[in-house]
Amino acid sequence: MHHQDILPGEIRAARVAAAFYEWLCDHGEILIATAGTLGGSDGEARARAVVASVTRGAEALEHLEDLRALRDLISNYVSGSLPAVYGDGDLVVECDPDAPQVVDAQICANALDCAIEALQSIKRGKVLRGRAGGHA
């Protein structure tokens, strides 16, 4: 692919995806803990699998569905849509906006929102280039 074939939006998406990869490498435990707190052992396992896979070199795009599920779980908490009892049914998380869990959840929700948008853009670009006869 020639450099001029890359659109500015694709460059931005690639930069955001790279930043998300770095965030997962440096702070993946925050995502794992937040998903575990809000989604119980299933949420924790899903986040742990994504973090382990991506930090070992897999593309985050391969985990787009898991990232969406984690985003939905965490965003529902941040928006106040989840009830007071979460996860395995025995943990109550306060919705104090200054609580560390809330701050971590907001950070994770923001990171996931940006990453998912970027990954979807990258995926669309690959599909469009493939349809146009380019190399994905």
Image: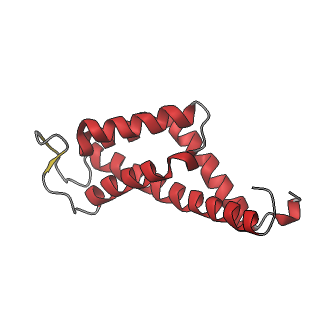
Whether residue 25 is visible, yes or no, is no
Name the spot of residue 41 as percent of width and height, x first: 26, 35
Locate residue 111 relative to residue 94 in the image: left or right.
Answer: right
Name the spot of residue 47 as percent of width and height, x first: 39, 39
Name the spot of residue 9 as percent of width and height, x first: 69, 67
- Residue 121: quarter of image: bottom right
Q: Is residue 29 above or below residue 117?
A: above
Locate residue 11 relative to residue 47 in the image: left or right.
Answer: right
Q: How is the image coloured?
A: secondary structure
- Residue 97: quarter of image: bottom left
Whether residue 80 is visible, yes or no, is yes
Q: Quadrant of the C terminus?
A: bottom right
- Residue 2: quarter of image: bottom right
The residue lying toward the viewer, choosing from 17 and 120, is 120
Q: Quadrant of the N terminus?
A: bottom right
Give me the residue at 56% from left, 33% from top.
Answer: 55
Give me the residue at 34% from left, 57% from top.
Answer: 72
Give me the residue at 20% from left, 58% from top.
Answer: 82
Q: Is residue 114 above or below residue 54?
A: below
Q: Is residue 55 above or below residue 34?
A: above
Q: Is residue 21 above or below residue 130?
A: above
Name the spot of residue 83 as percent of width and height, x first: 14, 56
Count of marks placed on residues: 0
